[in-house]
Amino acid sequence: MSEFAFKSATQLVRDIREGRISSSELLELYLERVERFNPDLNAIVATDIENARAKAKAADKAIANGDKTGPLHGLPITIKDTLEVKGMPCTSGAPLLKNHMPANNADVVQSLIDAGAIVFGKTNVPLYGGDMQSFNDVYGTTNNPWDLKRTPGGSSGGAAASLSAGLCGLDMGSDIGGSIRTPSHFCGLYGHKPSFGIVPDRGHVPPPPGIFTGDHSMVIDIVTVGPLARSIDDISLAMELVVAPEKSEQKAWRIELPEPRKKLLADYRIGFWFDDPVCPVDGSISDILQGIADDLSTHGVKIEEKHPDIDFAGTYDVFLSLLAAVMGAGAPSKLFDKWLSEAMELAFDDQSYMAKNIRGATQLHNSWIRVDVVRQIIRQKWSDFFREFDVLLCPVAPVTAIPHDHNHIYDRKIIVNGAERPYPDLMGWASLAGVACLPATVVPAGRTPEGLPVGIQIIGPYLEDKTPIHVAKLMEDISDGFVPPPGY
């Protein structure tokens, strides 16, 4: 039975439907693996086993009766602990919410359940999803199955660790600064950050739960909700199921994403951007990415080193300002007042990450509008680029999975090519798509000499999510695809 643990969700659903394994058997396989491997990983932090077993039994009965089944019928899945699931806690890693039991499912969770998925567990996150590592005071630290001394990333770190170790069939995460993409890169998975605004985020925490109890909710700037998986087919399927307007808007319109721009890999025009002095990339990663570009060229793809006419430093500053505004909006009054005081004392030329964060979190609305104007100019530069090119290939992050580091965030460093770099550089390459509202798909690209996974990011045009996903599909013969970590 162990051969089923690492199959794709699409293949598992087919196996259930065609009787090669039952939903109940697959659930028990995952639960056995959770019992065996999760104590070391701490990826799955809450479960609803009794309810999951009842639903798996019902799924098997439906197949036996010849009933119509959905595209995820009988598939056991987990969900990131920033998304509400009825019957399980949703803490968002916050002690304040450790007893929060949602009355309803998040919209995306309900879409997966309506398709036949069975949610049996919640996966770990950092405090309020606000870090690139996954640890908190409620559930502790999640470890990377490729190296337990390293993080699986954040904020969808538990989701990535669970999928990579073969503990579930699919997971749904969220992304503001790489929170789907970085864990996918760190754990050797596929992941997709959708275009901003095409997947409902009602039922995501933050914002605080219990405020929006009807159709209306607050849409958080930059944040998107999307899938992590072991195959690109699973990404495509999940996106078909969750793309929709927000609940309050569904009475008036639907979202119909355009089909991929091209049919064959050789028909695509691809640009690449593999390094930049503002956010240097470790040679162990850039070598693998260059190998992907060379293979694409060998396959007749029109590929060249070209990127949008944007300044990396300026774009990243815009992202950090907008990100800090989001984070600052949820800060307790006492902390916000402290930041206001500190902002008044910052030197004009202080461009440290701490200074940028404090300025962004306390900026006047007039300042935010000015930054947003620059964002729209950046978005236009991307649109201009996509008139000539179909997608852009770039790194997900400048390094592979980093060792656990729970020091104060301003004191953390990463090592790139033997030199210390600021910890926020982990978000640098992810910010390019985030600030411009663009879709980005992560594909496993290979492994370093240390044996750590490396992903490549495929950024596509706004609202053309099917194009980077299609390119990822066509790259299956070139990229490594998902490979289980040793020992699992």
Image (cartoon, rainbow, N blue to C red):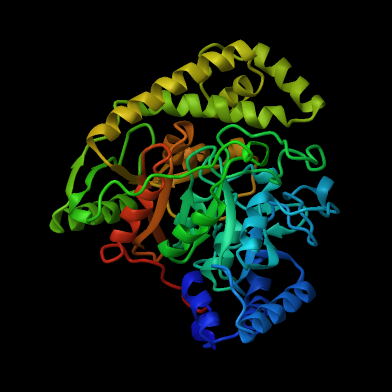
Q: Could you tell whether 324 is left or right of 422 in the image?
A: right
- Residue visible at 82% across and 53% down? 103
Q: Farthest residue toward the right? A: 99
Nearer to me, 263 or 6? 263
- Residue visible at 58% across and 31% down? 323
Nearer to me, 422 or 42? 42
- Residue visible at 64% across and 39% down? 251
Nearer to me, 467 or 5? 467
In the rendered view, tell whether residue 431 sits above or below residue 341.
Answer: below
In the rendered view, tell whether residue 19 sits above or below residue 432.
Answer: below
The image position of residue 151, as x and y in percent, is 56, 57
The image position of residue 149, as x and y in percent, is 56, 63
**Residue 169 can be seen, yes or no:** yes
Q: Could you tell whether 425 is left or right of 40 in the image?
A: left
Q: Quadrant of residue 45?
A: bottom right
Q: Could you tell whether 194 is left or right of 75 in the image?
A: left
Q: How many marks?
A: 0
